[in-house]
Image: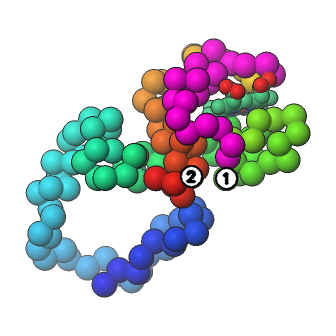
């Protein structure tokens, strides 16, 4: 059927279509899928087994590329000399993450006015899962 998503955690490249869109006949998980999309994001993590819903991580990656990558580096890769290396941020400290991103820290500006709590939450899904590698 569909090939498994890349296991190396590389970001999906521009939605490479695996052929022309086919009519979807019958999805055994269709109703579950609809249900999941209606649930608040916070409960999705429990519903899917991982700590974060993959859709949250993807949304966080996009948000990260828009607002954080210019300093923290693409895929959180940077020299780690002056800017914090987010790959080392402790994954058990979500509150510290929210606090630092919301209020700023050192040379990092506050994102209080730039990001909604939902945007900070998906950013945490991205950073806290190491870009999905440790979900
Ligand atoms: C203008 C450059 C810049 C941008 C943009 C930026 N950061 Fe930072 N960030 C920094 C610097 C510099 C530090 C190190 C702060 C310090 O400890 O003095 C840092 C530190 C952090 C830390 C660690 C804070 C702690 O508690 O030790 C986190 C988490 C973080 N950034 C997340 C983000 C996220 C998420 C975004 C995007 C919303 C972002 N940063 C955007 C420069 C930036």
Residue in the picture at 80% in, 48% down: 78
Q: Secondary structure at mark 1?
A: helix
Q: Position of residue 112 (x, y in %)?
A: 58, 17
Q: Which stretch appears magenta?
A: 87-107
Q: Give the mark nearer the N terminus: 1 vs 2.
A: 1
Which quadrant of the rendered structure holds the N terminus? bottom left
Q: Residue furthest right?
A: 81
User: Up-down: is 125 above or below 101?
Assistant: below
Residue in the picture at 52% in, 23% down: 95
User: Up-down: is 19 above or below 98?
Assistant: below
Tell me the residue that label 2 is attached to: 131
Tell me the residue that label 1 is attached to: 75
Q: Position of residue 103 (x, y in %)?
A: 63, 15
Marks 1 and 2 sit apart, C-alpha to C-alpha, by 7 Å
For the question of whether residue 104 can be seen, the reply is yes
Q: Residues within 10 Å of mark 1 (few under 14, many from 20)?
A: many
Nearest the camera: 95 or 92?
A: 92
Nearest the camera: 16 or 76?
A: 76
Q: Secondary structure at mark 2?
A: loop
For the residues labelled 1 and 2, say whether their Cβ atoms are less than 8 Å apart: yes
Dividing the picture into quadrants, the one containing residue 133 is bottom right
Q: Residue 116: within the magenta?
A: no
């Amino acid at each position: 059927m569909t090939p498994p998503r890349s296991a190396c955690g590389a970001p999906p490249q521009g939605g490479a279509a695996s052929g022309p869109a086919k009519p979807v006949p019958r999805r055994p998980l269709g109703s579950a899928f609809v249900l999941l999309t209606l649930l608040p994001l916070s409960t999705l993590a429990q519903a899917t087994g991982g700590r974060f819903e993959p859709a949250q991580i993807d949304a966080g990656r996009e948000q990260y590329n828009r607002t954080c990558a210019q300093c923290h580096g693409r895929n959180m890769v940077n020299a780690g000399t002056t800017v914090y290396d987010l790959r080392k941020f402790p994954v058990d400290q979500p509150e510290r993450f929210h606090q630092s991103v919301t209020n700023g820290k050192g040379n990092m500006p506050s994102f209080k006015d730039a990001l909604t709590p939902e945007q900070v939450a998906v950013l945490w899904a991205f950073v806290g899962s190491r870009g999905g590698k440790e979900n």
